[in-house]
Amino acid sequence: MAAAVEKIIENRTDDKVTGRKSLKWVGTRATRPDGVDKVTGRAKFGADTYLPNMLIGKVLRSIHAHARIVSIDASKALALPGVKAVVTRDDFSDQPVGAVQPAGEMIINYRDMTRNIMAREKALFEGHPVAAVAAVNDRVARQALELIDVDYEVLPHVIDVDEAMKPDAPLLRDDLITEGVDPAPEKPSNIAKRVEFGHGDVETGFGLADVVIEREFKTRPVHQGYIEPHACLASFTEDGQADLWCSTQGHFVARGHCARLLGMDVSKLRVTCSEIGGGFGGKTVVYLEPLALALSRKACQPVKMVMTRDEVFRASGPACGSSMWVRIGATHDGQITAADATLKFQAGAFPARQFRRLPNAVLRPTTWNMCAAWDTTCWSTGPKWRPTVHPVHPSASMPLSL
C-alpha cells in the first residue's frame, strides 16, 4: 500500500532532475510531506507510542464543581499489587505569587498552571485532577483510583457568567482582585478584569440615529472538538534526564512548562511532538504531561497517559461562553452613528490568558465606517477555558453583526 502511494507521488513530480514537484505555476498542488504516512497508517499519534516496561497512568478527578480538599489518603491505592506510584498536590512545588510570563497573545501564570494540573486547596471545576496513579495496566490503575480517599468540603458553585458577577455569588477564589477598576477594590470577587474603550460622544451619536436597536445575546462554551484526545508518554532516567512524547501544538512550549512545574533544568527534558489529530488552540497547554513526568520520576519507569473522550470535555479547555448587551444606532441610509456594548466573558478559575484577548473583542466596532462613537465594557469570569482558533472574536462579532 505504502509503495503504491509513493509511486503515485513520484509520477506526479514535474522536475525529473530534482525529483521534486514544480511549484512555479499558480494552482499547482503541493505534496503534503505527511500525506503518505497518514493514508498508509504509518503516522504515529500521541497514543501510538510505546516503550518497554511501560506503566499506565490514570487521573482521579473531582466530582464536585467547587469543593475544599480537606485531605487525601492514597495508602490503600499504594498497597494494591501492581501500583507503582501515586502523585498528589504534595508532589508539585507551589509557584510563587506573581510568577507570570508574558508570551505573545497570552499571559502565562505558573502559579495558576500548577493549580490547574493538580488541585491544591480547592477543586475549582468538576473534573479537576486531585491525584494520579501509575500501574502495570489499565485495570489496576482504575482500581487504584477507587481506593484513593478524598475528603471534600463541598462549596456552592456558579457557572453562568451573569450569576457569577452578582454581589452575593459564591466566591471561587479569595485571592482574585478585579483588575482595571479605579479605585482598586479591596475585596475579592469573581470578576477578573474590566477593560473599557471609548471614542467620541456616544449619546450624541445615538441622538443622530433614526433607528436604535438594543439586544442581548448569550453564547455557550464550545469545545475545539479535536478528534484525537490528549496523550503523552514520559520516561525519566536515573541521572535526571527525561523524554516526553506528546500530542501538542508546541513542543518547546510543553518543554518549558513541564520543566518549570517539575523544578527541572529545561536542558534535561527532551520533548518529541507526535502527529497531532487536531488542536485548534486547545493543545497549546499541558494537562497530562507534568503528571506523567512526575509519575515516571517516582516509579522509575516510563508512564503513558491518554485522556478518555469524557475527560477531554470535562478537564480540558473549551472556548469561553459569554453574555453580551449591544446597542447600535443608525440612519435610514445605513450609516452607523453610534455603538455601545457590554461583553462579559467566562475566563474560568485561571483567567490570565483571556486578559490579552479582551481588547480584541472590544475593538470589533472599529472595523465599521462610523461617524460617531462606541463604548464597550468587558468582564471576565467563570471555570477554566481555552481559545478556539480565533479567541473571543466570534462571540464579539455575532451580536454586532446581528
Image: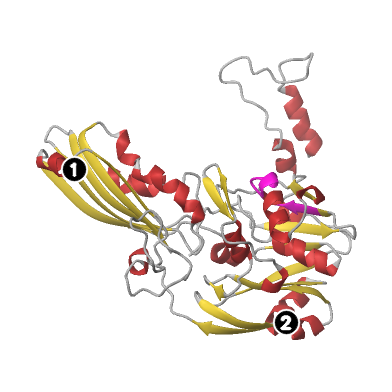
Q: Residues within 10 Å of mark 1 (few under 14, many from 20)?
A: some
* Between 11 and 213, the one nearer to me in the picture: 213
Q: Residues within 10 Å of mark 2 (few under 14, many from 20)?
A: many
> Under tag 1, what secondary structure?
helix
Q: Which residue is pictured at 71% across the width and 50% down the height? A: 255
Query: Comparing marks 1 and 2, which lies closer to the viewer?
Result: 1
- Along the horizontal axis of the image, is 278 left or right of 160? right
Residue type, numbered disc 1: Val
Q: Are marks 1 and 2 in contact (CB under 8 Å)?
A: no
- Along the horizontal axis of the image, is 15 left or right of 370? right
- What range of the chain is rendered magenta? 243-253
Residue type, numbered disc 2: Ala
Location of mark 1 (residue): 202
Q: CA distance from mark 1 to mark 2?
A: 60 Å
Q: Look at the image and say whether residue 106 sits in the magenta stretch.
A: no
Residue 392 percent location from the top left of the image: 42, 48
Which quarter of the picture shows residue 24? top right
* Between 38 and 63, the one nearer to me in the picture: 63
Location of mark 2 (residue): 74
* Between 111 and 32, the one nearer to me in the picture: 111
Q: Can residue 402 be seen in the rendering of this structure?
A: no
